[in-house]
Amino acid sequence: MSANQINIRIKINAPIDKVWAAIADWESQGDWMLQTRVWVTSDIRSGVGTSISALTGPLVKSGFKFGLLDKMVVTNWLPPRLCEVDHVGKIIKGTGKFELTDVSNNQEVATNFDWSETIKAPKAVFLLIYLPTYLGVRISLLRFRRSLTNR
């Protein structure tokens, strides 16, 4: 098994605190993530130790319960800048991170959103899943940005 990296950066025209509040609202992630439903599975709702599950599949949002289950535990929590998770499910293994950086200036209020995943998988498997994963996450993050800038 090798550690394979996926990185995406988008700029969001919103203040860092607003972006953090939206991204850290776990259950609402299903509103903008493609074909995904997200829920908290621990008593802890934020911070280190929070457990989250995400089910992704073609009919998940219509109540179908078949898809790829991703179980995560928050390992680092530094609001409003950084969240890191370990993927602890049976299929998806590795780490994930989102990092926010305030890039506001005199002309605009903006935040860079850096999303990254380190997926533990054989190289051949990673090469098969890389493009659909990258495109799905990129589209989802663009939908997330649109949800923040249309409010």
Image (cartoon, helix red, strand yellow):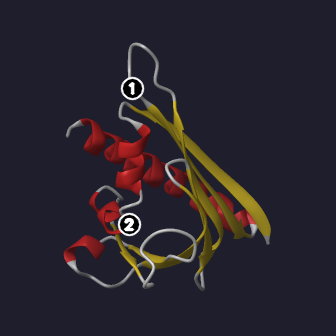
From this view, report whether residue 80 is shown above or below residue 31: above
**Residue type for callout 1:** Val
Report the label total.
2
Of 40 and 30, nearer the camera is 40
Can you give x and y, in whole percent of width and height, for residue 89 in the image? Answer: 58, 82
**Residue type for callout 2:** Trp
From this view, report whether residue 80 is shown above or below residue 119: above
Q: Residues within 10 Å of mark 1 (few under 14, many from 20)?
A: some
Q: Is residue 14 left or right of residue 72?
A: left
Of 68 and 148, nearer the camera is 148
Q: Tell me the residue at 71%/69% (across/down).
A: 120
Residue 3 placement: quadrant: bottom right
Look at the image and tell me in which quarter the C terminus lies.
top left
Cβ–Cβ below 8 Å for labels 2 and 1? Answer: no
Q: What secondary structure is found at the residue carrying circle 2?
A: helix
Q: Earlier in the sequence, mark 2 or mark 1?
A: 2
Of 70 and 25, nearer the camera is 25
Number of the front mark, 2 or 1 = 1
Can you give x and y, in whole percent of width and height, for residue 68 in the image? Answer: 46, 77
Residue 13 placement: quadrant: top left
Instruction: Name the residue carrying label 2.
Output: 26
Instruction: Name the residue carrying label 1.
Output: 109
Q: What secondary structure is found at the residue carrying circle 1?
A: loop
Look at the image and tell me in which quarter the N terminus lies.
bottom right
Q: Tell me the residue at 32%/70% (across/down).
A: 58
